[in-house]
Amino acid sequence: MSHNELKFLRTEIGTLTRFLEDLSEDNFIERIQLERRLANVRERLAEIEHLPQAKSLPITFRGAPVEGTRSIDAGFGAAALKAFIEATDTVAASLASEELKDSGPLPGGRERSLRIVDTALGSFGFELELPPLAPEEEPPQGSILPEVQERRVDAYALAIETTLALIDEVATSSASDEATSDAVAEMHRRAADKVRAFVKVLADHGALFAAEFEGRQVRLNSDEEVRRVVDALNVADMTEHEDEVEGMLIGALPESRAFECRSGDGALIKGKIDRSVADVMAFKAAWENKDALLRFRVVSARGKDRYFLKAASALRDENSAGQVE
């Protein structure tokens, strides 16, 4: 169900209600027509407001390829949209499955992706929309996204949020290069490279960018910010591997995703809980202060190893079994 249709119906109900309030009592015919229209709109709203909603994603561009609010260079527009969708597709694959490789087809295919539904207001751009999950759609086999409070995690919506958050964090960061590398390292190398490819399209065409999704606004306001993102997302000097350690999660902060673990030999391991763990609170509740086999994604860059906690599972000598991620 379209987010725009829901918004339009609610706005129309408000408008019709005001018209009726201002209408004089002797305008019988007009009142009957407005009341009939209001009843029809309310009936339509009642039919659809409980249905899963599509999520709106307006993106706009400014700069050399854009002629005010009138037009956009077709070659740039096509290249930018293609690169953005490839980026979000790849980030979604990295969050939904452990099978994402550095090359080759994305695991799970592309059963669901963004759609263009309109042009966006403000400069020139496009109103994109993410269709809701189909009622029968289930997380793919091997998914590392849990169900949270009996609701399925929408990997694609999370991917859009993650993509925009990374661009915003790198573009606006006044922190050191090391802190910026920490932000980039949180993402799968292939996914980060696809996000970089999108921003490089902007850089190559002298374009700027703005987007809004689920209440979060992200903007690249200058050529300097665009170039900063392109440079920061260069993953050529990064290597990645996985490691398993017997130890204990001794603390985790849901907002920052920071954690501390103590290995079996007493070593302290600090890092962040991987973005593939959608519900940090559930993970913390399940594994804090318990001996477990901890699985890390280790990213090495500029002489530093960065640890991202991906999963925990019960040790063989414990009665509990299974894995929470």
Image: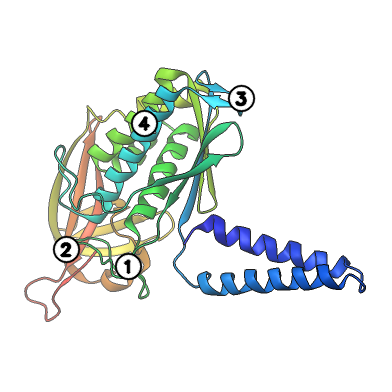
Q: Give the alpha-carbon distance from disc 4 to disc 3, as whole Å.
A: 22 Å
Q: Residue furthest left?
A: 316
Q: Give the alpha-carbon distance from disc 1 to disc 4, as whole Å.
A: 35 Å
Q: Earlier in the sequence, mark 2 or mark 1?
A: 2
What is the number of the mark on residue 198?
4
Amino acid carrying label 3: it is Gly
Q: Which residue is mark 2?
A: 141
Q: Earlier in the sequence, mark 2 or mark 3?
A: 3
Given this view, does label 4 or label 3 mark the residue nearer the observer? 3
Amino acid carrying label 2: it is Gln
What is the number of the mark on residue 63?
none
Q: Give the alpha-carbon distance from disc 2 to disc 3, as whole Å.
A: 46 Å
Q: Give the alpha-carbon distance from disc 2 to disc 1, as whole Å.
A: 24 Å
Given this view, does label 2 or label 3 mark the residue nearer the observer? 3
- Asked if 282 appears above or below 59 in the picture, the reply is below
User: x%, y% of residue 225?
Assistant: 48, 26
Given this view, does label 2 or label 1 mark the residue nearer the observer? 2
- Asked if 300 appears above or below 56 in the picture, the reply is above
